[in-house]
Image (tube, coloured by chain):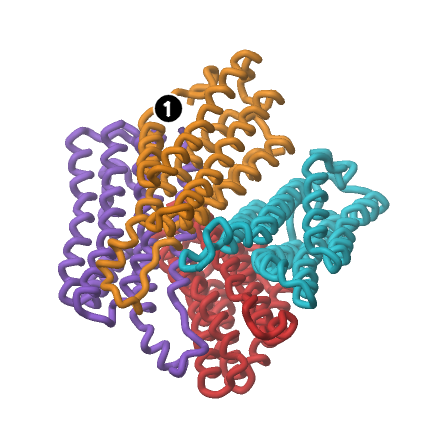
Chain colours: A orange, B cyan, C red, D purple
Amino acid sequence: MDKGRLEAFSDGVLAVAITLLVLDLRVDVNSRDSLASQLRHEWPSFASYVVSFFIIGVIWVNHHALFARASRVDRGVMFYNLLLLMFVVTIPFTTSTLAAYLRTGGADQRVAVVLYGISMEGMAISFTLILWHLVRRNLLLRPVSAEQGRTAVRRFGMGTLIYPVGVIVGLVSPVAMLVLYAVVVGFYIADQTPVLPTADV
Amino acid sequence: MDKGRLEAFSDGVLAVAITLLVLDLRVDVNSRDSLASQLRHEWPSFASYVVSFFIIGVIWVNHHALFARASRVDRGVMFYNLLLLMFVVTIPFTTSTLAAYLRTGGADQRVAVVLYGISMEGMAISFTLILWHLVRRNLLLRPVSAEQGRTAVRRFGMGTLIYPVGVIVGLVSPVAMLVLYAVVVGFYIADQTPVLPTADV
Amino acid sequence: MDKGRLEAFSDGVLAVAITLLVLDLRVDVNSRDSLASQLRHEWPSFASYVVSFFIIGVIWVNHHALFARASRVDRGVMFYNLLLLMFVVTIPFTTSTLAAYLRTGGADQRVAVVLYGISMEGMAISFTLILWHLVRRNLLLRPVSAEQGRTAVRRFGMGTLIYPVGVIVGLVSPVAMLVLYAVVVGFYIADQTPVLPTADV
Amino acid sequence: MDKGRLEAFSDGVLAVAITLLVLDLRVDVNSRDSLASQLRHEWPSFASYVVSFFIIGVIWVNHHALFARASRVDRGVMFYNLLLLMFVVTIPFTTSTLAAYLRTGGADQRVAVVLYGISMEGMAISFTLILWHLVRRNLLLRPVSAEQGRTAVRRFGMGTLIYPVGVIVGLVSPVAMLVLYAVVVGFYIADQTPVLPTADV
């Protein structure tokens, strides 16, 4: 199975999902509040928009880097990739829910934080499953040893620990969680150790 | 006519349609219900989201596999492909309608099940028409005998029987219908007998 | 300027516009009407959905065929192409407006028919401008004589007469207009005389 | 890192963002106003739709022209490109806000003008950062001298002055601002001095 159309389809889904984030930015011309005060009141929407935009952006970069290392894709990759996209596509929903409840406090806010964390964690786990499957089925351009494969999956899988930590932080302060994710995304963009030692980009 | 742009356009439409499914996931911050109770109450939306996401995902895989076997496309293929896309694009609507009426019971629920079935069946029939046209007009990369062609169309067309069965199940229990479709999609992803004997992917 | 990215961008816009048509299909679970009666009442939305879907589909086929004949694109082509896309992108809006007012009769219905006609006519004119510009600036793969060019533009431009005729029909009966457009689209799909004699697809 | 997928992803995001502009065109069939009067009343939506459509269109052309001159992309380019897309994706929101408040006058209107200006200015600055980064890191197909690079960035960066001027005009008359932007876009389409002397398209 040819990986080109898998990449094209994934790019399409990621491009639509990242753009649908804008639907959460909204003001109401019939509101009794001034526009300036509405925009101030809507700051959680703007903050979550920026964080989610860069998270999906980094997902796209990761996706690109991972499949650049694949020689071909099979049914398993296709399935885990659909799983990944299924979680990514929920991000506009969980982002908008988080933004809506970021001001309410209480149990609702904590539920919104957990919901946001689920879409992120599902995405991170799917990503690790794709790499694990590529390694296990020898679908990489440059084969790695069993030991190197395990190390790569373990290092990549560490990404799945960041989101639960974020959720724990978020139960106390959702804003601190967004700041944490923004910092992680920033670090990722500035410099990331390559996952597979034998495949330097 | 070059099949590359037909594939690119179809990928685009499928990517947008699959992503629009998220618009059906929604909570209301002004509701008197807690977020947790809204999410529990919204389980039909989540269940239908997952099932429809993987159905469109499998459509995309099928589309990919089918056109990988085509040498070129003509006006007929283009028309049946538009028909296919027309049904696929209704899936976010019929999914959202099904989710909305999954809790109501009664005649409305049964109408929603039939509506969902129509978009699926229309999609399955269009797919079979594409294969039938490719076989009939010798548009395959590796020509098949008349006998092989009939067999392939017959086997492929059997997919058009699954959805009516699902609708009959759904008239009794829509949840059982969703479970059935999920199982079929799961089987499809795990292993599918190739449709055309002469064209192994 | 490379025509590949112009085609990719146009495919993207056409794919999104055609898929957004689904946003006009909608039922209200809180309505006092049964779902069956809502769907019956919504028939103008379904009829316009099908007609507009195939109109955009045919636009895509035309776009494809036209640019397959272009050797390269310049600033003028790019501008007329943006103009074309600008009209195409309004189709989900004018379709939804037509569907909404198809039951009201009176002046509103006639305004909706004219609005729908404007988006179609703007699209047809932009298309003719693209061909006219390609001919005039010698941007075709196989150059045509001045005489052949004029003939091609004249024949292609005849498409711009169909939509005003449709509007006049629609002022009397919008349903007749939709039927007329459906017939024209059907004819187009079944068989179309090539526009440029020297460039057979 | 391969620039092809960056271009494909950016094309996707730009195509979705430009098409989402249509969601701001809306009439209400249940309104007591006639359709004709609603459309007249909605002129700011139509005017902003056209201006924003061509602004995003020109962004796409610029993006295309800029990356045609890049030999490859690195992490920095990827980051500035995400920044660019993040601002572009806000345009449907700021356009819709501008259109909504274009009739209200007063402080709200001025806030809407500034908000619209921020999305445009953020976009213009991100664009200049991409060029600056490509020059600085020698990522151009044809290397330029330090002096030529500085000149190119300075000339390109002059685009970042147009939007603040537009905002100042807009504080007095938002319509004059839209006319100004339309004129600038028109000039751009008609003729633009190449940014990099050594890289003629």
Return the residue nearer the eye: B146 or A118.
Answer: A118
Q: Which residue is mark 1?
A: A192
Please tell me whether mark 1 sits on a helix, a strand or a loop.
loop
Q: Please indicate, yes or no, whether residue C172 appears anywhere in the rendered image.
A: yes
Q: Is residue A174 above or below residue C85?
A: above
Q: Amino acid at mark 1?
A: Gln
- Horizontal placement of D33 versus A66: left or right? left
- Horizontal placement of D37 versus B118: left or right? left
User: Which image quadrant: the C terminus of chain B?
Assistant: top right
Image spot of residue A103 (x, y percent): 33, 50
Q: Is residue C30 above or below residue D149?
A: below
Image spot of residue A142 (x, y percent): 53, 18
- Horizontal placement of C85 versus D50: left or right? right
Query: For residue D9, what is the image quadrant?
Result: top left
**Mark 1: few, some, or many residues within 10 Å (few <14, many ≥20)?**
few
Residue appearing at x 14%, y 56% in the figure: D165
Residue appearing at x 51%, y 21% in the figure: A153
Q: Is residue C17 above or below residue D59?
A: below
- Horizontal placement of A61 versus D143: left or right? right
Image spot of residue C83 (x, y percent): 38, 62
